[in-house]
Image (cartoon, rainbow, N blue to C red):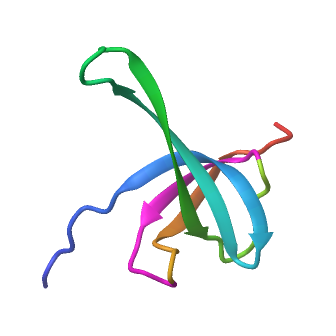
């Protein structure tokens, strides 16, 4: 049996849950500027498949890469790490 490649896993914060079964997750990473050597925050927004609609804005979540589900969705929810109210 053929084994798939390793899938990317990211941790981020939910920004929006206004769509059905879809959330928007913001990933923050630190990158060093090539010339000035200062550390800069870079942000990316990922569209994530949330089958049960369990996430709310502010939640910390873990997401995994999957095959394309729609024009923008290429990630799925693995687990909710921390809720907003905790």
Q: Residue furthest left?
A: 2
Q: Quadrant of the N terminus?
A: bottom left
Residue 81 position in % (x across, y down): 63, 46
Q: Is residue 36 above or below residue 3?
A: above
Look at the image and say whether residue 60 sits in the magenta stretch.
yes
Q: Position of residue 16 (x, y in %)?
A: 74, 58
Q: Which residue sits at x=67%, y=72%?
A: 22
Q: Name the residue rendered at 51%, 75% in the picture.
A: 72
Quadrant in which residue 86 is drawn: top right
Residue pictured at 68% horizontal, 52% vertical: 14
Q: Which residues are magenta?
A: 58-70
Task: Judge whether residue 54 can be spotted in this image.
Answer: no
13 sits to left or right of 83: left
The residue at the far right in this view is 85
In the rendered view, tell whether residue 61 sits above or below residue 34: below
Q: Is residue 33 above or below residue 20?
A: above
Residue 45: x %, y % from top left: 55, 54
């Amino acid at each position: 049996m053929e084994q798939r490649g390793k899938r990317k896993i990211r941790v981020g914060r939910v920004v929006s849950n206004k769509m059905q079964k879809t959330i928007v997750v913001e990933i923050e990473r630190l990158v060093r500027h090539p010339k000035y050597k200062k550390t800069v925050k870079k942000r990316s927004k990922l569209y994530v498949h949330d089958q049960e609609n369990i996430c709310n804005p502010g939640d910390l979540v873990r997401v995994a890469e999957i095959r394309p589900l729609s024009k923008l969705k290429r990630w799925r929810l693995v687990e909710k790490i921390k809720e907003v109210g905790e």
